[in-house]
Amino acid sequence: MLGLLLDSRLVTRDSLLVTPDTIEQIFRTDSRRVLATLIRLLGDFDLAEEAVQEAFSAAVERWPQDGVPRNPRAWLVSTGRFKAIDSLRRRARFDASLRPLADQLGDGITQPDEIEEEGVPDDRLRLIFTCCHPALPPDAQVALTLREVCGLTTEEIARAFLAPAPTLAQRIVRAKAKIKAANIPYQVPARTDLPERLASVLQVIYLVFNEGYSASSGASLTRHDLSVEAIRLGRLLVELLPEPEAMGLLALMLLHESRRETRTSPEGELVLLDQQDRTRWNSELIGEGEALVERSMRSRQFGPFTLQAAIAAVHAEAASPDTTDWTEIVGLYDVLLRADPSPVVELNRAAAVAMRDGPAAGLRLIDDILARGELRDYQLAHAARAELCRRLGRAADSIESYQRALGLTRQEPQRRFIERRLRELGQP
Amino acid sequence: MKYLCLIYENEKNWETMPQSDAEAIMNEYFAFTEDIRKNGKYVAGEALQPTPTATTVRVRNGKISTTDGPFVETKEQLGGFYLIDAKDLNDAIQVAARIPSARLGSIEVRPVVDFSAEAAKREEAAGARA
């Protein structure tokens, strides 16, 4: 046991340069990976979190004298593990039920190769799949992923989701309890389960992204961080598991993110796609998104996220709204509808048809969709109908639909946008 | 780790189903049971008589009260169970998905409480007293 600690305590020559900043830097870049490995080794979230804290406290104490170990992460993992077993043994003296666990973990420590990372799937990937396990309620999957994988505090998550912190904390506690009680394994799923399990991970990431993306004004700063976190998660996932749909989701997020700056005016008003200043779209993000779409498409195993990203890429390629390839977009929506039929996709397709064949053709499709009833309470369906009626000069129909949309909208900028349109149509 | 797989389905299905379909499902059940016996995951399993045969028992103020029927009337009823020994929840989900009724109704998978640590503690406490 001691041998292991000594081995990884090899001192670098820069030992004099160790400052609290060095350790903080390592904490920022490595603490989540250390946590993920400790969860695997200790089999317990709370024990592992305590161990990470202990390991970094030990680093603050020792590194300024001993220097930074050659492999700081391995040092932190073995120190954290040692501390956790130590504290378990101490507690086991008073609580016999902990003894088997303490013994079992103590035995394991003679196998240092477990800490080696070569050839073993990254522990963060296991952590993502455990946090997004479909046996956990969806809101708990989101909270747990942001807490454990991204390292956000419960207060930060609560603020971003506009939920009370105790509610969030309880959600996380219950999810951890279920992981333990039901023995949800800490592993990357087998190939046969991968599509279903990956879908659940992608859903969580996309939900986090949208939560940050659709928000505006007021608490916008903290909520924008959610999109940043989602993109970071997406990058991590593609790096660890380059599945076509993981690439598709990352591409979709990057392509949306590239337009963020232009989606709202300096006054905080909503700016629609055809009004946005395309010279201000982030070309670096667009390039990265487009490359990912191509990679995913080439695999021929792509799904709905890649198709949505491909549609976003067609928009990104057009220098102006009138040079947009609407035929291509309608075609992609046709494929998307076959892969993932939904009335919302149908609505988007109808809007694209309106651009390709004129507002009357689009309006016919939207009226059909609305008549079926599924989107009766969907604000964007009424807003889209209102817009097409307006273009066709049918002011009364347009006003009626904008008023329906207004009654359904809950976002402030959207409300102001509709009110502005209503004023233009001569409504007070 | 042990998991109880509770089989819920609409018991009316069995009444209206053609004889040949019912037989086919029964054959699947026998094959499935045989298979999980062989790979060591089977602990126990039974099918239940339909809910009209159920009796609900309560004790209130020291008195037994007995009522006819199941505890709650639902669209799907508990029709049987398997107690299985699985590696973890993912393993248990794989087994549960192969229960023929998973296609017709649904299977609730519940981890069984392990009292062995608690028992060890009690034994130790008893030992200390002796």
Image (cartoon, rainbow, N blue to C red):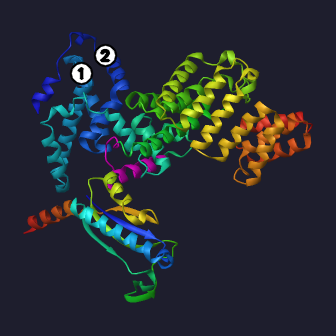
The CA span between labels 1 and 2 is: 17 Å
Q: Is residue A410 above or below residue A276?
A: below
Q: Secondary structure at mark 2?
A: loop
Q: Which residue is mark 1?
A: A71
Read off the chain for label 2.
A
Q: Position of residue A95 (x, y in %)?
A: 19, 55
Q: Is A171 contained in the magenta span?
A: yes
Q: Is A25 contained in the magenta span?
A: no
Image quarter of residue A44: top left
Residue at the (35%, 42%) spot, across then down: A191
- Principal secondary structure, stretch drawn in magenta: helix
Residue at the (36%, 39%) spot, across then down: A127
Q: Position of residue A261 (x, y in %)?
A: 65, 22
Which label was assigned to residue A19? 2
Disc nearer the start of the sequence (1/2): 2
Which amino acid type is shown beneath numbered disc 2?
Thr
